[in-house]
Amino acid sequence: MANKISINVNGKMHTGAIEARKLLSDYLREDLSLTGTHIGCDTSSCGACTIHLDGKAVKSCTILAVQADGCSVTTVEGLATNGELHPIQEGFKEEHGLQCGFCTPGMMMTATDLLKSNPNPSEQEIRDALEGNFCRCTGYHNIVKSIQYAAKKMA
Amino acid sequence: MIPTSFDYKKANSVEEALSMLGDDTQILGGGHSLIPALKLRLNSPGTLVDISKISSIKEISDGGDSIAIGGGATHASIANDKSLDQYCPMMGQAAREIGDIQVRNVGTIGGSIAHADPAADWPAILLAADARIVVQNKNGSREIAADQFFKGFFETALEEGEIITAIHIPKSQKNSNSCYVKFKQPASRFAIVGVAAAVEMDGSVVKSARLGLTGVGEFAYRATAIENALTGKPLNETTINEVVQNATENTNVMSDHFASEKYRAHLANVYLKRALRKLG
């Protein structure tokens, strides 16, 4: 049975009819072609699929798209404004925060949620906040520096 | 991974949700236990009834002699609740160690205890806290003591057609002196062994204690023999070493590739001692 949904994604309304079993991560990637949201483990461990749902970082592989009906979603594609990089994106670029880049969108979405509630986090607070985001290149050191760069820039 | 097909109904109130429940339906709370199970096709209900949008069961409020936590309250909202930190610190300590930030933002306490994973944190804490679980069905509501709620491996006292609407945490002397410690599986952060301890003191002597363990057996349980042995004794290193032995007696200790039966049983004693040392 198709379910009608209406979701605001990165400031744009999307309406459609979808199967109830469609995951939010698949909806974003397949139906909206927003492939910045990555699917890594697909078991809510790795954090590559992290997006903001009504402003909070969540794992989109463990939420049904129908559950996001009436909600507002931000993906990594929604970070930049008018072609200008978000400070977190600039931070990852300046501090070499990515190697293969697979975990990067999820890292940035978790980091931007952290910086909203804690604009000046300590190194430990950043590392704690990233507990649900895995970098299999193990590039955590520069990821932390990238987030510190963004915090400074946004202060 | 894609679940099997199902119908989806969104409920705007508990009453509406109850009217939607029937044969082959399953309740969807935060979905952080259920959706992984659906994706692995361990579970394939015909219809999901989504209760995650019902705002009346998300609140945490002061109920006089207890704190009332809505069944739909997320782990994150429990982690950030100041009154729980005051009246029952083990609640926030446990909430802050569940999964990760993203999981805590969505997963709910009601969903977790209804699922009753043997390695979940909440069952141990609700047992130690002497919590009361309020469930609603078509005929009204009933309260279940935590001691009667957890029945077995993924098994609870919940009946078909019932929704967990609230969990009441008594504002007791015991709960105000409580803590939760766990040895966690590093990827999932589920408890390999988790110990919740609530101890009421009379001066330096233990007046009464409640000790909940999770991750160890097929379901969470209380170490009642150790609770009784502690009573009337000073809470010091000598007592702790003397009393905390065989924390797994009468329990069928689990074994998996993370921890053997022998190692788990050993950890149960080690973490019980650590919890009591924090309260002494």
Image (cartoon, helix red, strand yellow):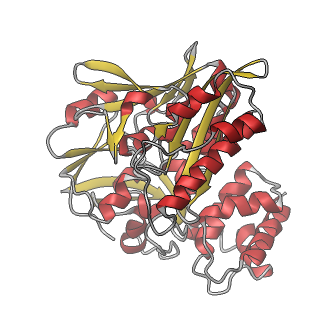
Residue sticking out furthest to the bottom: A100
Residue B164 locus on image (x, y percent): 37, 32
Q: Is residue A72 above or below residue B127?
A: below
Residue B80, can we see it?
Answer: no
Q: Nearer the viewer, residue B87 or B82?
A: B87
Whether residue B92 sits left or right of residue B219 in the image: it is: right
Residue sticking out furthest to the top: B64
Name the residue rendered at 71%, 59% in the picture.
Answer: A128
Name the residue rendered at 64%, 23% in the picture.
Answer: B231
Residue sticking out furthest to the left: B23
Residue A132 locus on image (x, y percent): 59, 63
Q: Quadrant of residue A57?
A: bottom right
Q: Is residue B114 above or below residue B40?
A: above
Name the residue rendered at 59%, 64% in the picture.
Answer: B186
Q: Nearer the viewer, residue B230 or B85?
A: B230
* Quadrant where the N terminus of chain B is found in the figure: bottom left
Q: Nearer the viewer, residue A51 or A3?
A: A51
Residue A112, can we see it?
Answer: yes
* Quadrant where the C terminus of chain B is found in the figure: top right
Whether residue A155 sits left or right of residue B68 in the image: it is: right
Whether residue B273 sits left or right of residue B263 in the image: it is: right
Residue B256 locus on image (x, y percent): 44, 65
Q: Is residue B138 above or below residue A2?
A: above
Q: Quadrant of residue B171?
A: top right
Q: Nearer the viewer, residue B104 or B85?
A: B85
Residue B117 locus on image (x, y percent): 41, 49
